[in-house]
Amino acid sequence: MLAAAVDAVPEGRGLAYEPKWDGWRALAFRRADSVFLQSRSGRDLTRYFPEIARAVRTAVPPGTVLDGELVVWQGERTDFALLQRRVTAGRRLTAVARAHPANYVLFDLLGAPPDRVLLDLPLAERRALLTDLLADAPASLTLSPLSTDVGQAMEWLRAWTAAGVEGVMVKTLDGRYEPGRRGWRKYRAWCSTEAIIGGVTGTADDPETVLLGRLDETGTLRYTGRSHPLRPHQRRELAPLLTPAGPGGPAHPWPQPLPAAWSGQLDRPEPLPYVPVDPTVVAEIEVDTAYEHHRWRHRVRFLRPRADLDASDVSGLRP
């Protein structure tokens, strides 16, 4: 079951709130003699998370189907890069898993022994069964918090985003589980900050998206992220302020095209051609909490240019 994005946290009777964890969504199927971990896209994740497979096999009986989020903690917050490292570790997978063990944060129960399908039960009943099931589970199998108090949800947004919580999930207590349907709602935590425009896709006269950076301690512009597509009025407002970087000026600090690993095109991992511009225009943007290794993992929202700010005001890689 999926979630539709909303711009405000809904309130009302019969609603329940959960933290939205920054990890990989996964189903766990406890079979008669094995465990199968499946990603949201249907990919087999079992071999990348052997410690979670063992925990599920030990803690729950055959016929159980769990829904939750795989996360890896680094200190007091989740670390998405350590999660991704599982897939690229190769022969070092055992060492990586031992050094940075994963947790499976569980929020739904879809099947129970003996082969009982729970999809048509209301969430409140599925949740009660899940709570009982995990009563004696190991610490790596964690029950995600749930509350009917919107004030608690707002507290998660205020205090837990530093630990890697991306926002709040909103569900109806009497709702059934409908695979493939966006029947839940998702509010993502956002905050405003500034960044320097170092390039655009499209053209300088009609920019489609902006590529952003911040100055490091040496004064070098480091790439930090890409915006969502600009609206027509934003294109018109921004275009007169942009100057394509050309011969005779200082060398642009970013490669051309932008490496796929930089631009975060997970669905289409190809280098991104772009138009370099003089890094003099500061943009006010809205960003979410997924900021790691000096980059925003998700696209940011462009709000407006900040003509009152100089690029030198946007220094430091922590926004």
Image (spheres, rainbow, N blue to C red):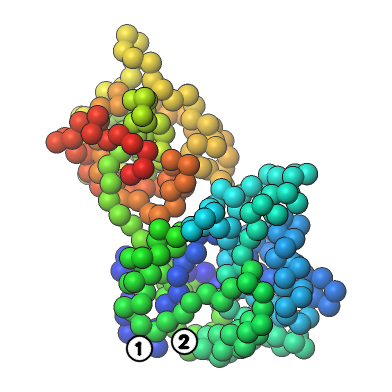
Which residue is depicted at the point 65% across and 58% down?
Answer: 101
Dot 1 falls on a residue whose secondary structure is loop
* Label 1 CA crowd tier, 10 Å (few <14, some 14–19, many 20+): few
Q: From where the camera sits, is residue 72 visible?
A: yes
Which residue is depicted at the point 54% across and 36% down?
Answer: 260
Query: In the figure, is residue 4 to the left or right of 68?
Result: left
Quadrant hosting residue 156: bottom left
- The x, y position of residue 67, in whole percent, is 61, 73
Which residue is depicted at the point 33% across and 72% down?
Answer: 154
Identify the amino acid type marked 1.
Arg
* Residue occupying the far left of the picture: 308
Which residue is depicted at the point 36% across and 34% down?
Answer: 213
Between 288 and 58, the one nearer to me in the picture: 58
Identify the amino acid type marked 2.
Leu
Up/down of 133 relative to 31, above or below: below
- The x, y position of residue 195, in whole percent, is 30, 38
